[in-house]
Image (spheres, rainbow, N blue to C red):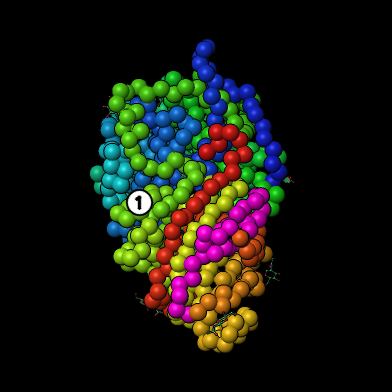
Amino acid sequence: MLRLALSALVYSVCTIAGSTSVLPGQALKSYINPVIPGFSPDPSCTRVNGTFYCVNSSFNAFPGNPLYVSRDLQHFKQIGNVISRPEQLPGLANTNGSTSGVWAASIREHGGMFYVTTTLVYDNMPQQNLSRWDNILFTNPDPIGNPNGWSDPIHFYFPGYDTSLFWDDDGKVWVQGSHAWQIYPQIQQYQIDLSNGQSLTGDPIMMWNGTGGLAPEGPHVYKKEGWYYLLIAEGGTGLNHMGTMARAQNITGPWESYEHNPVLTNANTSLYLQTVGHTDIFNDTAGNYWAVALSTRNGTKNFPMGRETVMVPVDWSGDWPVFNGATPGHAYIQMQGPLPAVESAVEGESLAYEQSTGHLAGADEWELFAPGSTLPVHYLYLRLPDTSKYAISPEGHPYSLSLLGSWRNLTGTDGRTGNPTFVGRRQTQVRFESQVDIEFAPQLDGEEAGLTVFLQQAAHFDLGVVSLSASSASQQGYPPPGNGTDMSRYIRLRTITVNSTHQGTVDPISTPMILPLNLSTTEPVKLTLRVQAPNESSYLFSWSETSSNAWNVIGSGDATQTIVGMFASGNGINSTTPAYFSNFIYSGWRDFPGQP
Ligand SMILES: *[C@@H]1O[C@H](CO)[C@@H](O)[C@H](O)[C@H]1NC(C)=O
Ligand SMILES: *[C@@H]1O[C@H](CO)[C@@H](O)[C@H](O)[C@H]1NC(C)=O
Ligand SMILES: *[C@@H]1O[C@H](CO)[C@@H](O)[C@H](O)[C@H]1NC(C)=O
Ligand SMILES: *[C@@H]1O[C@H](CO)[C@@H](O)[C@H](O)[C@H]1NC(C)=O
Ligand SMILES: *[C@@H]1O[C@H](CO)[C@@H](O)[C@H](O)[C@H]1NC(C)=O
Ligand SMILES: *[C@@H]1O[C@H](CO)[C@@H](O)[C@H](O)[C@H]1NC(C)=O
Ligand SMILES: *[C@@H]1O[C@H](CO)[C@@H](O)[C@H](O)[C@H]1NC(C)=O
Ligand SMILES: *[C@@H]1O[C@H](CO)[C@@H](O)[C@H](O)[C@H]1NC(C)=O
Ligand SMILES: *[C@@H]1O[C@H](CO)[C@@H](O)[C@H](O)[C@H]1NC(C)=O
Ligand SMILES: *[C@@H]1O[C@H](CO)[C@@H](O)[C@H](O)[C@H]1NC(C)=O
Ligand SMILES: *[C@@H]1O[C@H](CO)[C@@H](O)[C@H](O)[C@H]1NC(C)=O
Ligand SMILES: *[C@H]1O[C@H](CO)[C@@H](O)[C@H](O)[C@H]1NC(C)=O
């Protein structure tokens, strides 16, 4: 579940002696958390042959449910998105509120078919309204060979969210999920017919209450040595987040709680990684078990990175899995740990992976928008885009991305739907720098385009070129245009932040920083716009004449955002002049060698 209730942090790096077996003579590699940096909540992973497949939540972003594959548990390549065609999920056009959209997904493989279950949540509807919970199932026989080949969804009934599939040895398939509105929220399940999403056992039945923590959710069932194990998240997705377990000898229960719960939590510690929970377990070809979980970093002020994916070794040689070699109840996820060699079991498989195109999670980029290319797989829109407003290398403007401004801008209260013209990528390092060249000749009053760091409609910082009439400028209290022409161009930084004491409302917009450009009204403005995050708590905005190295700092703001992107808007009117963006660069600082 998504509640961005976050507090603050200290930067410390802890190394651990992991419990994972490392064979003699094997080079000791290490992995560094988060293994998938930047906005990657609610991870779920599974292994097939020598390849790991992971998915997670994407909320209002489109494409949705990014699919990552890894061969070594160090590099995670995003090869596609489970939801890549608007027709798969038209409802994504109308999600209302920043906590709506596609929630946690679960990925499993059975009999040569991959299955992803997830929930499209309309978070503004009452809990009891079944229309709030659109549970959906996608299939793809070959995610690497055909990364956008996920089926249209089968919609299936579940009065809640976080649905996950389990195949029993007798061929029966059970779907578990978090029932959202019982007096005691609880994990429930039913036996599902995967061909049509119907229940074969009537209404969902109670499995487990959890151990008394808030919001039992994120269930996964595993079978090992005759026992059924149920792993769930409890405590809410904030500082009390934890993983707890129960087991049973029959899939229908009764479920017996582990006496040493929680199996995993960073609650009541002052570790850098906090809010650890929403866990999934898988094994590698060497027989080692692993778990992924979501986590946030305890920043001094804000959490610019959002909820990220961390990994931890698991020892499951005994009855219950032991996370990170810990005494039960004290299993902490830390920043790094040893990683055994993970070899492919299947010849040819490695090649298919190597040849697949995609984007390594956390990688830097210099995007050229070359003629004939498409937008990279890791780029995101807000809800379903109006594709007529986006073009790569249009006539006369090779190596550019043209954006035509929507009448909407990026701002809205939390209860606003709509799809402003906007595309971007996740901020994947705490400290980074990003820049883009813009060529834009706005004509109409209010037309604007530029660079944004975007968390949600009620929280984003926009550095844009805007044209304003003399009367609009004076109404907004901006300095008058330089030489009395009616329409003038400005460079403007607006910071829109959520008022933490009044969640869901937009603060009166802080006074924008604005400079008249004093250019003639016919020549396009050509500038380079830049944002830098020099530390974990602030962003610095600057601009320069394109191909000049003289940067003019325009302002700064507190860090809370997670997507860096380009936008265009008429601020209430439909734009008629496209903005041309080129050379989009993102470059992150690595805090540790080898960090993604
Ligand atoms: C986060 O870091 C701050 C600053 O060091 C510290 O005071 C606070 O206790 C930490 N919070 C948690 C939950 O560890
Ligand atoms: C896994 O290996 C088996 C046996 O070689 C093969 O039939 C199957 O297609 C492989 N599955 C995937 C997803 O690579
Ligand atoms: C559920 O909410 C939708 C949208 O608000 C509404 O149209 C519908 O009538 C509600 N259904 C029930 C059963 O309350
Ligand atoms: C669920 O939890 C509540 C409160 O802890 C308890 O009263 C109830 O009996 C539990 N239900 C089951 C089936 O365990
Ligand atoms: C599991 O429980 C079901 C009824 O809930 C029963 O029909 C079945 O025989 C049980 N299986 C085992 C192995 O005990
Ligand atoms: C390891 O993972 C595979 C694939 O998910 C699963 O089929 C197998 O049962 C697991 N092995 C053990 C010993 O749990
Ligand atoms: C979003 O939901 C809220 C609460 O139900 C409602 O008041 C508001 O009108 C909705 N907004 C839109 C654009 O549907
Ligand atoms: C507008 O002002 C700039 C500098 O302030 C000047 O170079 C330019 O000639 C002026 N344009 C007009 C049309 O007056
Ligand atoms: C939040 O809004 C309230 C009421 O408008 C205001 O008093 C308060 O100063 C605002 N807080 C911040 C941090 O701007
Ligand atoms: C966004 O557009 C609306 C009109 O649709 C306008 O009222 C508002 O001032 C614009 N800017 C911001 C930052 O909200
Ligand atoms: C913008 O254009 C769309 C159609 O593309 C239209 O539905 C909408 O009303 C227009 N908005 C304004 C403010 O003109
Ligand atoms: C989760 O999704 C985000 C994008 O929404 C992506 O950056 C991240 O790598 C994904 N993580 C996993 C485990 O799939």
Q: Position of residue 106 (x, y in %)?
A: 41, 42
- 150, 198: nearer the viewer: 150
What residue is drawn where x is 31% and y is 65%? 395
> Left or right: 243 with respect to 162?
right
> Left or right: 61 with respect to 535?
left
- Above or below, 265 against 153 in this view is above
> Judging from the image, what secondary structure is the residue with disc 1 in?
strand
Q: Position of residue 481 (x, y in %)?
A: 58, 82
Q: Which segment is the magenta one?
A: 521-549
Magenta-colored stretch includes residue 548: yes
Would residue 472 be seen by someone viewing this image from the given angle? yes
For ligand 12, tell me if the residue under mark 1 lies within 8 Å.
Answer: no
* Residue labelled with disc 1: 83
Amino acid type at mark 1: Ile
**Residue 140, quarter of the rendered image:** top left
Q: Position of residue 29 (x, y in %)?
A: 54, 24
- 143, 577: nearer the viewer: 577
- Above or below, 363 against 482 in this view is above
- 145, 4: nearer the viewer: 145
**Residue 250, quarter of the rendered image:** top left
Q: Position of residue 2 (x, y in %)?
A: 53, 52
> Left or right: 344 with respect to 524?
left
What residue is drawn where x is 32% and y is 29%? 351
What residue is drawn where x is 29% and y is 58%? 87
